[in-house]
Image (tube, rainbow, N blue to C red):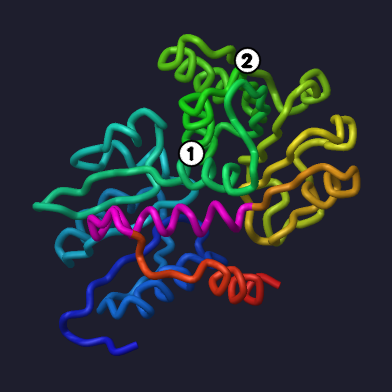
Protein backbone atom coordinates (compact mmCIF):
# COMPACT_ATOMS: atom_id res chain seq x y z
CA UNK A 1 0.00 0.00 0.00
CA UNK A 2 1.53 3.26 -1.17
CA UNK A 3 0.18 6.07 1.02
CA UNK A 4 0.91 9.60 -0.19
CA UNK A 5 -0.45 13.14 -0.14
CA UNK A 6 -3.29 12.14 -2.49
CA UNK A 7 -4.50 9.06 -0.56
CA UNK A 8 -8.22 9.26 0.28
CA UNK A 9 -9.42 8.10 3.69
CA UNK A 10 -12.53 5.98 4.27
CA UNK A 11 -13.47 4.54 7.63
CA UNK A 12 -15.84 2.84 10.03
CA UNK A 13 -17.24 4.46 13.17
CA UNK A 14 -18.96 2.67 16.02
CA UNK A 15 -18.43 1.38 19.53
CA UNK A 16 -16.88 -1.14 19.84
CA UNK A 17 -15.02 -1.59 16.55
CA UNK A 18 -11.93 -3.55 17.67
CA UNK A 19 -12.95 -6.83 16.02
CA UNK A 20 -14.31 -5.37 12.76
CA UNK A 21 -13.36 -7.11 9.53
CA UNK A 22 -14.39 -4.14 7.37
CA UNK A 23 -10.82 -2.81 6.91
CA UNK A 24 -9.71 -6.13 5.45
CA UNK A 25 -12.56 -6.15 2.94
CA UNK A 26 -12.34 -2.53 1.83
CA UNK A 27 -8.55 -2.36 1.67
CA UNK A 28 -8.56 -5.55 -0.41
CA UNK A 29 -11.00 -3.97 -2.87
CA UNK A 30 -8.96 -0.76 -2.99
CA UNK A 31 -5.81 -2.75 -3.64
CA UNK A 32 -7.01 -4.97 -6.48
CA UNK A 33 -8.68 -2.00 -8.19
CA UNK A 34 -5.51 0.14 -7.89
CA UNK A 35 -7.37 2.82 -5.92
CA UNK A 36 -5.32 5.29 -3.89
CA UNK A 37 -7.47 4.87 -0.78
CA UNK A 38 -7.17 3.47 2.72
CA UNK A 39 -9.85 2.27 5.17
CA UNK A 40 -9.55 2.56 8.95
CA UNK A 41 -11.69 2.14 12.08
CA UNK A 42 -12.48 4.75 14.73
CA UNK A 43 -14.04 3.98 18.09
CA UNK A 44 -16.43 6.87 18.80
CA UNK A 45 -18.14 7.77 22.06
CA UNK A 46 -21.79 8.80 21.89
CA UNK A 47 -21.16 12.34 23.15
CA UNK A 48 -18.54 12.87 20.45
CA UNK A 49 -20.54 11.70 17.44
CA UNK A 50 -21.61 15.12 16.14
CA UNK A 51 -18.15 16.57 16.66
CA UNK A 52 -16.55 13.63 14.86
CA UNK A 53 -18.71 14.26 11.79
CA UNK A 54 -17.71 17.94 11.78
CA UNK A 55 -14.07 16.85 11.96
CA UNK A 56 -14.55 14.42 9.07
CA UNK A 57 -15.78 17.27 6.90
CA UNK A 58 -12.76 19.39 7.80
CA UNK A 59 -10.42 16.50 6.99
CA UNK A 60 -12.18 15.78 3.71
CA UNK A 61 -13.05 12.16 4.44
CA UNK A 62 -14.93 10.96 1.38
CA UNK A 63 -17.07 8.31 2.99
CA UNK A 64 -17.54 6.07 5.99
CA UNK A 65 -19.56 3.19 7.37
CA UNK A 66 -21.57 3.21 10.59
CA UNK A 67 -21.99 0.25 12.92
CA UNK A 68 -23.59 -0.37 16.31
CA UNK A 69 -24.83 1.55 18.18
CA UNK A 70 -25.14 4.57 15.86
CA UNK A 71 -27.06 3.42 12.77
CA UNK A 72 -30.23 5.21 13.87
CA UNK A 73 -28.73 7.92 16.07
CA UNK A 74 -26.48 9.28 13.31
CA UNK A 75 -29.41 10.16 11.06
CA UNK A 76 -30.13 13.40 12.90
CA UNK A 77 -26.60 14.67 12.20
CA UNK A 78 -26.58 14.08 8.43
CA UNK A 79 -27.31 16.71 5.80
CA UNK A 80 -29.36 14.42 3.60
CA UNK A 81 -30.71 10.87 3.79
CA UNK A 82 -31.30 8.66 0.78
CA UNK A 83 -34.90 7.58 0.23
CA UNK A 84 -34.09 3.90 0.78
CA UNK A 85 -32.26 4.61 4.06
CA UNK A 86 -35.13 6.79 5.25
CA UNK A 87 -37.55 3.98 4.45
CA UNK A 88 -35.40 1.40 6.24
CA UNK A 89 -34.97 3.69 9.24
CA UNK A 90 -31.21 3.36 9.62
CA UNK A 91 -27.93 4.42 7.98
CA UNK A 92 -24.78 2.32 7.65
CA UNK A 93 -23.07 4.14 4.77
CA UNK A 94 -22.29 7.85 4.43
CA UNK A 95 -20.93 9.66 1.38
CA UNK A 96 -19.38 13.13 1.32
CA UNK A 97 -20.61 15.03 -1.73
CA UNK A 98 -20.66 18.79 -2.46
CA UNK A 99 -20.02 19.69 1.16
CA UNK A 100 -22.76 17.41 2.49
CA UNK A 101 -22.86 14.09 4.31
CA UNK A 102 -25.51 11.89 2.68
CA UNK A 103 -26.74 8.75 4.45
CA UNK A 104 -27.49 5.43 2.75
CA UNK A 105 -28.24 1.88 3.85
CA UNK A 106 -26.67 -1.24 2.34
CA UNK A 107 -27.48 -3.60 5.24
CA UNK A 108 -30.98 -4.45 4.02
CA UNK A 109 -29.96 -5.10 0.43
CA UNK A 110 -26.85 -6.97 1.56
CA UNK A 111 -28.90 -9.29 3.76
CA UNK A 112 -31.56 -9.93 1.14
CA UNK A 113 -28.87 -10.77 -1.43
CA UNK A 114 -27.39 -13.32 0.99
CA UNK A 115 -30.81 -15.03 1.12
CA UNK A 116 -31.29 -14.93 -2.64
CA UNK A 117 -27.78 -16.28 -3.24
CA UNK A 118 -28.66 -19.20 -0.93
CA UNK A 119 -31.85 -19.94 -2.89
CA UNK A 120 -34.20 -18.56 -0.23
CA UNK A 121 -37.36 -16.81 -1.43
CA UNK A 122 -38.84 -14.02 0.70
CA UNK A 123 -42.19 -13.42 -0.96
CA UNK A 124 -45.16 -14.65 1.10
CA UNK A 125 -42.92 -15.97 3.90
CA UNK A 126 -43.54 -15.66 7.64
CA UNK A 127 -40.39 -14.28 9.23
CA UNK A 128 -39.37 -13.97 12.89
CA UNK A 129 -36.87 -11.16 13.52
CA UNK A 130 -34.97 -11.03 16.81
CA UNK A 131 -33.89 -7.55 17.90
CA UNK A 132 -35.06 -4.03 17.12
CA UNK A 133 -31.84 -2.05 16.66
CA UNK A 134 -30.43 -0.43 13.55
CA UNK A 135 -29.66 -3.70 11.78
CA UNK A 136 -33.13 -5.02 12.52
CA UNK A 137 -34.74 -1.80 11.23
CA UNK A 138 -33.00 -2.09 7.88
CA UNK A 139 -33.48 -5.83 7.48
CA UNK A 140 -37.13 -5.92 8.62
CA UNK A 141 -38.10 -3.05 6.34
CA UNK A 142 -36.27 -4.63 3.40
CA UNK A 143 -37.99 -7.97 4.05
CA UNK A 144 -41.35 -6.17 4.06
CA UNK A 145 -40.43 -4.36 0.85
CA UNK A 146 -39.42 -7.71 -0.69
CA UNK A 147 -42.88 -9.21 -0.19
CA UNK A 148 -42.81 -11.03 3.15
CA UNK A 149 -46.29 -12.10 4.26
CA UNK A 150 -45.75 -11.60 7.98
CA UNK A 151 -43.01 -10.20 10.20
CA UNK A 152 -42.86 -10.88 13.93
CA UNK A 153 -40.51 -8.68 15.94
CA UNK A 154 -39.14 -9.77 19.31
CA UNK A 155 -36.89 -7.62 21.47
CA UNK A 156 -35.77 -7.53 25.09
CA UNK A 157 -37.25 -4.03 25.34
CA UNK A 158 -40.76 -4.43 24.00
CA UNK A 159 -41.22 -0.69 23.37
CA UNK A 160 -38.53 -0.84 20.69
CA UNK A 161 -40.16 -3.76 18.90
CA UNK A 162 -43.53 -2.00 19.15
CA UNK A 163 -42.11 1.15 17.56
CA UNK A 164 -40.51 -0.80 14.72
CA UNK A 165 -43.71 -2.78 14.15
CA UNK A 166 -45.65 0.49 13.90
CA UNK A 167 -43.16 1.88 11.37
CA UNK A 168 -43.43 -1.22 9.18
CA UNK A 169 -47.24 -1.22 9.31
CA UNK A 170 -47.30 2.48 8.52
CA UNK A 171 -45.15 2.06 5.41
CA UNK A 172 -46.38 -1.36 4.25
CA UNK A 173 -50.07 -1.61 5.01
CA UNK A 174 -50.54 -4.97 3.30
CA UNK A 175 -48.21 -6.93 5.58
CA UNK A 176 -49.08 -8.54 8.91
CA UNK A 177 -46.78 -7.31 11.71
CA UNK A 178 -46.65 -8.50 15.31
CA UNK A 179 -44.36 -7.64 18.20
CA UNK A 180 -43.53 -9.07 21.60
CA UNK A 181 -40.67 -9.46 24.05
CA UNK A 182 -37.85 -11.89 23.34
CA UNK A 183 -38.85 -14.23 26.16
CA UNK A 184 -42.13 -15.01 24.37
CA UNK A 185 -40.44 -16.63 21.37
CA UNK A 186 -42.04 -20.05 22.01
CA UNK A 187 -45.38 -18.60 20.87
CA UNK A 188 -44.03 -17.88 17.39
CA UNK A 189 -42.49 -21.12 16.14
CA UNK A 190 -44.73 -21.41 13.05
CA UNK A 191 -42.47 -19.37 10.78
CA UNK A 192 -40.44 -19.96 7.62
CA UNK A 193 -37.37 -17.91 8.51
CA UNK A 194 -35.74 -16.76 11.78
CA UNK A 195 -33.24 -13.89 11.70
CA UNK A 196 -31.06 -12.99 14.67
CA UNK A 197 -30.36 -9.24 14.54
CA UNK A 198 -29.26 -9.04 18.17
CA UNK A 199 -25.64 -9.10 19.36
CA UNK A 200 -26.34 -12.19 21.48
CA UNK A 201 -23.71 -14.81 20.67
CA UNK A 202 -21.17 -12.34 19.32
CA UNK A 203 -17.53 -12.71 20.32
CA UNK A 204 -16.49 -12.90 23.13
CA UNK A 205 -19.86 -14.13 24.48
CA UNK A 206 -19.95 -17.07 22.11
CA UNK A 207 -21.80 -19.44 24.45
CA UNK A 208 -24.96 -17.32 24.45
CA UNK A 209 -28.01 -17.80 22.21
CA UNK A 210 -30.95 -15.41 21.71
CA UNK A 211 -33.61 -18.16 21.78
CA UNK A 212 -33.92 -21.94 21.89
CA UNK A 213 -34.12 -22.82 18.19
CA UNK A 214 -34.62 -26.55 18.89
CA UNK A 215 -38.40 -26.09 19.33
CA UNK A 216 -38.80 -24.85 15.74
CA UNK A 217 -39.49 -27.06 12.71
CA UNK A 218 -36.40 -28.36 10.94
CA UNK A 219 -37.78 -26.76 7.76
CA UNK A 220 -37.14 -23.32 9.27
CA UNK A 221 -34.31 -21.32 7.69
CA UNK A 222 -32.12 -19.82 10.44
CA UNK A 223 -30.04 -16.68 9.83
CA UNK A 224 -27.62 -14.78 12.02
CA UNK A 225 -26.12 -11.43 11.02
CA UNK A 226 -23.22 -11.96 13.45
CA UNK A 227 -20.01 -12.87 11.61
CA UNK A 228 -17.65 -13.32 14.57
CA UNK A 229 -17.74 -16.21 15.18
CA UNK A 230 -18.50 -17.29 11.63
CA UNK A 231 -20.89 -19.92 12.95
CA UNK A 232 -22.55 -18.84 16.19
CA UNK A 233 -23.83 -21.30 18.77
CA UNK A 234 -27.31 -20.29 17.60
CA UNK A 235 -26.49 -21.50 14.07
CA UNK A 236 -24.73 -24.61 15.36
CA UNK A 237 -27.84 -25.55 17.35
CA UNK A 238 -29.96 -25.07 14.22
CA UNK A 239 -27.54 -27.16 12.18
CA UNK A 240 -27.91 -30.02 14.67
CA UNK A 241 -31.60 -30.10 13.70
CA UNK A 242 -30.69 -30.19 10.00
CA UNK A 243 -32.02 -26.68 9.45
CA UNK A 244 -30.64 -24.58 6.61
CA UNK A 245 -28.41 -21.87 8.10
CA UNK A 246 -27.03 -18.59 6.77
CA UNK A 247 -24.30 -16.73 8.67
CA UNK A 248 -23.43 -13.05 8.67
CA UNK A 249 -20.30 -13.24 6.51
CA UNK A 250 -22.13 -13.02 3.18
CA UNK A 251 -24.14 -10.02 4.34
CA UNK A 252 -20.95 -8.33 5.56
CA UNK A 253 -19.28 -8.72 2.18
CA UNK A 254 -22.41 -7.76 0.20
CA UNK A 255 -23.01 -4.55 2.15
CA UNK A 256 -19.33 -3.57 1.83
CA UNK A 257 -19.42 -3.94 -1.96
CA UNK A 258 -22.63 -1.90 -2.13
CA UNK A 259 -21.01 0.81 0.04
CA UNK A 260 -18.12 1.09 -2.40
CA UNK A 261 -20.49 1.44 -5.31
CA UNK A 262 -22.16 4.33 -3.51
CA UNK A 263 -18.88 6.07 -2.66
CA UNK A 264 -17.53 5.82 -6.18
CA UNK A 265 -20.84 6.18 -8.06
CA UNK A 266 -20.40 3.02 -10.09
CA UNK A 267 -23.13 0.71 -11.32
CA UNK A 268 -20.76 -1.73 -12.94
CA UNK A 269 -19.16 -4.51 -10.95
CA UNK A 270 -16.06 -3.53 -9.00
CA UNK A 271 -13.24 -6.02 -9.57
CA UNK A 272 -13.51 -8.45 -6.68
CA UNK A 273 -12.98 -12.11 -5.81
CA UNK A 274 -15.59 -12.98 -3.19
CA UNK A 275 -14.20 -16.47 -2.60
CA UNK A 276 -10.78 -14.95 -1.91
CA UNK A 277 -12.32 -12.49 0.55
CA UNK A 278 -14.16 -15.29 2.36
CA UNK A 279 -10.91 -17.21 2.55
CA UNK A 280 -8.87 -14.59 4.34
CA UNK A 281 -11.82 -13.46 6.48
CA UNK A 282 -12.32 -17.02 7.73
CA UNK A 283 -8.65 -17.10 8.60
CA UNK A 284 -8.96 -13.77 10.45
CA UNK A 285 -11.99 -14.88 12.44
CA UNK A 286 -10.90 -18.40 13.26
Q: Quadrant of residue 203?
A: bottom right
In the structure shown, which secondary structural element does the residue marked by tag 2 occupy? Answer: strand
Q: Nearer the viewer, residue 217 or 105?
A: 217
Question: Residue 284: where, in percent of width, then height?
Answer: 62, 75
Q: Going by the image, does 233 lie left or right of 80?
A: right
Q: Quadrant of the C terminus?
A: bottom right
Residue highlighted by disc 1:
134
Distance of label 2 from label 1 (alpha carbons): 18 Å
Question: Residue 91: where, in percent of width, then height?
Answer: 37, 42
Stretch of the chain drawn in magenta: 248-268
Question: Residue 215: where, in percent of width, then height?
Answer: 89, 31
Determine the residue positioned at 81% across, 54% down: 207
Q: Nearer the viewer, residue 75 or 231?
A: 231
Magenta region includes residue 266: yes
Query: Residue 20 shows which numbered tag?
Result: none
Q: Quadrant of the N terminus?
A: bottom left
- Dot 2: within a 10 Å radius of its alpha carbon, few (fewer than 14), some, or many (20 or more) residues? some
Residue highlighted by disc 2:
178
Q: Nearer the viewer, residue 160 or 220?
A: 220
Q: Going by the image, does 20 lie left or right of 216?
A: left
Q: Going by the image, does 150 lie left or right of 217?
A: left
Amino acid sequence: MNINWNTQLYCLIGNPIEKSLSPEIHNYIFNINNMNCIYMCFNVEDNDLHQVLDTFKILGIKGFNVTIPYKIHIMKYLDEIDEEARLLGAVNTVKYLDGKFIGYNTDGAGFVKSLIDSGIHIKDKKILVLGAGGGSHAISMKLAQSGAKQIILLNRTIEKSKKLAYNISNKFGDISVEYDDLKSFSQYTDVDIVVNCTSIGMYPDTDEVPIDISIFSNKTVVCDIIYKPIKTKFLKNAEKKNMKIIGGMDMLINQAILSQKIWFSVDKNIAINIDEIKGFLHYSVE
